[in-house]
Image (cartoon, rainbow, N blue to C red):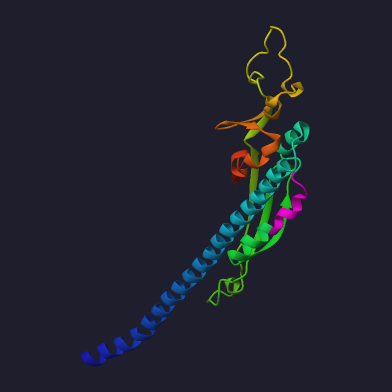
């Protein structure tokens, strides 16, 4: 009698055991699905960051290209302020390229008020099949903004630093009016780390774009 009861109890417990195991498996697959969705969001974030930085860096290169077109103190001031880099939207092509390398597509690329680019992306791949239907076809989306900051300003060679009060003595002659060889270096670029003399005849010697402008992601 006792053995029959034990066998009966075991028989009744087996369906409960199966139900518990099935429930645990479902939870495991559900956690996996949620994890996959989180991975896609992270992938989208990486792609958005890379795309925004690419657009900003491309525009930074365009700004340096404008300096190489020829020396004009007024134009150079505008360029160093980030105002003369050409069609800003053209740099969004670089965002498309970097997003594609990260298996994502750009949904929007917006050049903001100087300086910056805001890029929204969507991953090309979905989270994949799972027990949670809502995540099966979901794609990761993200937005990032990259900004460009000038690192240099243009000054007349021999002029006192802008932080110092002007001299009360006799005014110095304008170096740009000199007819000697030094006229070629009448101006200098005052940058974060060092200064550069400007030689209009050797503009190819200008510092790299990264020395002229900083590019970084905006704080979220």
- Tell me which secondary structure the magenta stretch mostly adopts: helix
**Which image quarter: residue 103?**
bottom right
- Would residue 45 be counted in the magenta stretch? no
Q: Position of residue 146 (x, y in %)?
A: 63, 48
The answer to whether 97 is drawn above or below residue 190 in the figure is: below
The answer to whether 96 is drawn above or below residue 64 in the figure is: below
Q: Magenta span covers which residues?
A: 85-93
Q: Position of residue 76 (x, y in %)?
A: 73, 35
Q: Position of residue 90 (x, y in %)?
A: 74, 55
Pick the residue in front: 159 or 95: 159
Pick the residue in front: 5 or 14: 14
In the displayed orientation, state which residue is furthest to the left.
2
Pick the residue in front: 65 or 30: 65
Q: Residue at x 73, y 15 (%)?
A: 173
Q: How many marks?
A: 0
Quadrant assignment for the N terminus: bottom left
Q: Residue at x 62, y 35 (%)?
A: 151
Pick the residue in front: 205 or 180: 180
In the displayed orientation, state which residue is furthest to the top.
169
The answer to whether 82 is drawn above or below residue 41 in the figure is: above
Q: Residue at x 77, y 47 (%)?
A: 86
Question: Left or right: where does residue 75 sit relative to residue 125?
Answer: right
Q: Position of residue 12 (x, y in %)?
A: 35, 86
């Amino acid at each position: 009698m006792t053995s029959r009861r034990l066998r009966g109890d075991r028989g009744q417990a087996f369906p409960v055991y199966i139900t518990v195991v099935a429930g645990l498996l479902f939870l495991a697959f559900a956690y996996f699905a949620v994890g996959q969705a989180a991975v896609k969001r992270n992938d989208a974030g990486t792609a958005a960051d890379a795309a925004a930085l690419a657009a900003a860096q491309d525009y930074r290169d365009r700004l340096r290209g404008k300096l190489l077109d020829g020396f004009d103190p007024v134009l150079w001031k505008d360029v160093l302020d980030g105002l003369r880099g050409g069609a800003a939207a053209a740099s969004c092509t670089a965002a498309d390229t970097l997003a594609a390398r990260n298996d994502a597509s750009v949904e929007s690329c917006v050049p903001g008020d100087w300086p910056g680019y805001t890029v929204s992306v969507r991953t090309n791949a979905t989270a994949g099949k799972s027990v949670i239907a809502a995540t099966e076809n979901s794609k990761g989306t993200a937005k990032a903004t990259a900004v460009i900051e000038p690192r240099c300003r243009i000054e007349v060679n021999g002029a006192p630093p802008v932080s110092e009060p002007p001299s009360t003595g006799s005014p110095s002659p304008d170096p740009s009016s000199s007819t000697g060889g030094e006229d070629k270096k009448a101006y200098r670029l005052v940058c974060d780390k060092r200064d550069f003399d400007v030689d209009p005849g050797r503009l190819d010697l200008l510092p790299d774009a990264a020395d002229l402008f900083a590019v970084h992601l905006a704080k979220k």
